[in-house]
Structure formats: C-alpha cells, structure tokens
Image (cartoon, helix red, strand yellow):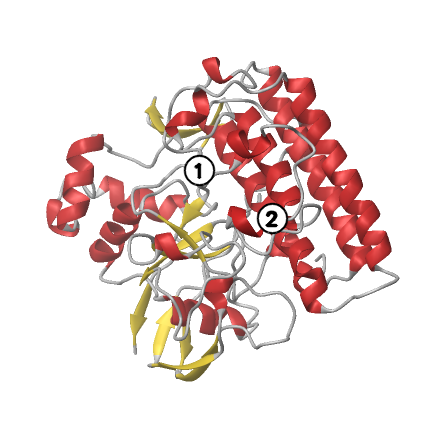
Amino acid sequence: MTSSFRHAGPVELATALRDAHDRTLALFECLAAAGFDQASRVPRLAIVNPPLWELGHIAWFAEWYTLREAASSDPRSVRHPSLLPDADAWFDSNTVGHDARWSLPLPATAEVKNYFSEVHERITARLARTAMDDQSDQALYPYRLILSHEDMHGEAFFYTLNTLGVTLPAALLFNAGRYERAPALHFDGGILKRGAEPEKGFAFDNERWRHACQVSAFEIDTGPVSNADFCAFIDDGGYIKLQHWSEDGRAWLEHTGRTAPAGWEYNDGQWRCRRFGKVHQLNDNEPVRHVSLFEAQAYCAWAGRRLPDEAEWEWAARTSHPGFQWGQVWEWTASRFEPYPGFSPGAYREYSAPYFGNHQSVRGASFATPDRLRSAHFRNYYQAHRDDIFVGFRTCAPR
C-alpha cells in the first residue's frame, strides 16, 4: 500500500501530485470523449458537476492555497492573482453555486486543460524549492491539502462516469472485491482515543482534536453485507414490508419507487447491475453498493441488527484484526456527521462545518479511493439519499 499523504515530504508530494494529475486528466478525457466536457450535454443533476468546471475548480483550488498563498478560503487572504483571468468568478465553489455551473462562459476545453497543467508544473517547481528549505508540517500543509482535494474530486469523477453511463478504459478498470463470510467479531469496548494529535502530520479539520470516547462491548460483521445477503432481503419483501423502514425511509421509497439498489435490473430470473454503461451479472460475493442510508437501515431492521456507529467502526478497523475487511466500498454508519469537541474550521473553512448535523458519517474507502488517502481515521459524509457513491454497509449489535 502506498504510504499516507499525511506525512509526505516534498519529493513524495511531488510524485503523488503527478499521479493525481495524470488520473484526473485520464478520467476527464473519458468524459470529454463522450461529449461531456460541454456543459450543455451534461444533465443538471444535483449529484454531478459539469466536468470542465470540475477540472478548472481542481486547478483553481490548488493554485489558491499554494501559488496564490491564500491563508484561508476567505478571498481577503489571497496574496496573488490567478494565472487565468476570471478564474475566481468561474471556479470558486463558495461563490459559484451548483446550478450556476452550467451557464458560465468558461474558456475552451484546451485552455482549461492548459491552466490545469500549468498550475501543476508551477506547484512542482515550488515543491522542489521547498525541499531545500522548510519541510515543516506547517509549510507542507497546503500541498497535502490540495493533494487530498484532488484525490477526492478524482473519486467524484468516477461517480460521474458511472452516473452518466460512460465506459471506463481498461487502464481504469477495477476489482470490486469479495470476501468469505465469517463469524462476527467481538470487541469488549473501552476507551477509544479518537481524532488527530497536534503536530503529527496533516489532519482534516473534522478530525481535530484527540479526545477520549467510551465504547461499549459490541459485535460487528467481518465485512460488508454482500449482494447475496441483500437479495435475501429483497426476496423476503424487504422493499414492501414497510415495518422495516423509518419514516424518512418510507418517504424516500414513495418518492423514488425503488424496489432494489440503484442500477440493479431483474431479467430472466437473474439480477444484473449496470456499471459504467455496461450490464453485468450480479456477483453474489461482492459487497452490495449503491444503497442509500434508508436501504441500509431497513436491511438492518429486517436482520435484527443495526449499523455500527463511527466509534465502533473505527475501533474495529484500528485493531488491524485480519478478519475485519474494509476498503471495497464506503460504509454507512449510524452516526450523524458532527464535530469533535473543540472543533474549529481549517484553512478550507467550508470543508466540514456546513455539513455538520445534516449529513451522515461514512467510513472506509472504495476501489476509487487512492491508497494514500485510506485511513481508519478518515471521516467521509453524505446525505442519506445518496446512492450514486460506491457505498454499502455492515451490521453490528451490542454484546
């Protein structure tokens, strides 16, 4: 596994940024080849961005915190103009609302790509100078921040490709993962030290700071619920027996009309799933994915179990128990996304704070998450209805 970006020095960061840069462009080219670099051809969905806007935003964000030396996302803190005139008016996600991104007078695709590449080249040159100067966590914080930002947007490009039905090239194909069912793991609980320690490398603001958390004894599945497991729920009328569903879940069912996970199709007595524009026979042993929080909760109610909360999931993941398998899909937890005690926003002020209390905590990683970003500490978060992400779940119970 690639080492974490959180402690990477200038040379490692330059290599990782090149890797992220190449992956971003490869994913963008897939979308552009299908005509989706033109905003007019991209459906106005709340779960996607126009890909050309997203490419420009990644470059703008990287330039903002490094080359332009902004101390925060506050425009008053920026010290230098952009390499691309009007970039602030186009690519600042804090001032350019989601709906507005389809009607911006963006430059041609080639110009945005040139901007993206020039920003990267200048950042690499600056990192080379940093290697001979200050290598403190404070000096390297902006570079680690922009790397994580690009990696997350890279995964979002995978979501977009799948949502729009664009085929992945062979170089970007993946193994979705499988596992053998094993007895649940049992943990006695105790005190879990959660959160980042000051001056211990990079930390996202929602991971700050270290604090003690009491965890009661619990048992937890060794891996996520599989497609075969979820088929049993469907076959037993899981989407029809409303007693398994929360009030919000029943409202979601009525609104969506859903009778199976997103992308599933039932033909000739077999379940199939649509992925990246192609239909595949459902693999029973793969973790179920593309399920909303409501579906995960309903399955747990049907099974007489529940979702693990964040602390339980992290406790199990950090034990390094060989039986605890994670990383094939993101996993819903039972926890609302909330700040840790003593929270204060980081330089990217809008990274976490707007989402506390209205998003659900998601843990783990997916096939589209770069190894350097994977961590048992990492806190992801989504709204309960999201099923376009590569997300599944596992079950848990008290002991």
Say whether residue 158 is left or right of residue 339: right
Type of residue at label 2?
Val
Q: Determine crowd level at label 2: few under 14, some 14-19, many 20+ residues with C-alpha closer than 10 A.
A: some
Q: Is residue 300 above or below residue 233?
A: below
Furthest residue to the right?
Answer: 132
Q: Can you give x and y, in whole percent of width and height, for residue 282 in the image?
A: 44, 34
Q: Can you give x and y, in whole percent of width and height, for residue 1 in the image?
A: 70, 58
Say whether residue 135 is left or right of residue 82: right
Taking the spot 44% from the left edge, 28% from the top edge, the residue there is 163
**CA separation, marks 1 and 2?**
15 Å
Kindly indicate the quadrant of the structure image that contains residue 142.
bottom right
Residue linked to disc 2: 78
Q: Is residue 12 above or below residue 61?
A: below
Q: Determine crowd level at label 1: few under 14, some 14-19, many 20+ residues with C-alpha closer than 10 A.
A: few
Which element carries disc 1, helix, strand or loop? Answer: loop
Taking the spot 76% from the left edge, 45% from the top edge, the residue there is 123
Q: Inspect this view and state whether residue 174 appears.
A: no
Say whether residue 22 is left or right of residue 352: right
Q: Inspect this view and state whether residue 103 appears.
A: yes
Closest to the observer: 304 or 74?
A: 74
Residue linked to disc 1: 95
Q: Quadrant of the C terminus?
A: bottom left
Which element carries disc 2, helix, strand or loop? Answer: loop
Type of residue at label 1?
Thr
Closest to the observer: 193 or 315?
A: 193
Taking the spot 47% from the left edge, 14% from the top edge, the residue there is 41
Kindly indicate the quadrant of the structure image that contains residue 116.
top right
Say whether residue 229 is left or right of residue 89: left
Q: Is residue 162 above or below residue 381?
A: above
Kindly indicate the quadrant of the structure image that contains residue 361.
bottom left
Taking the spot 40% from the left edge, 76% from the top edge, the residue there is 186
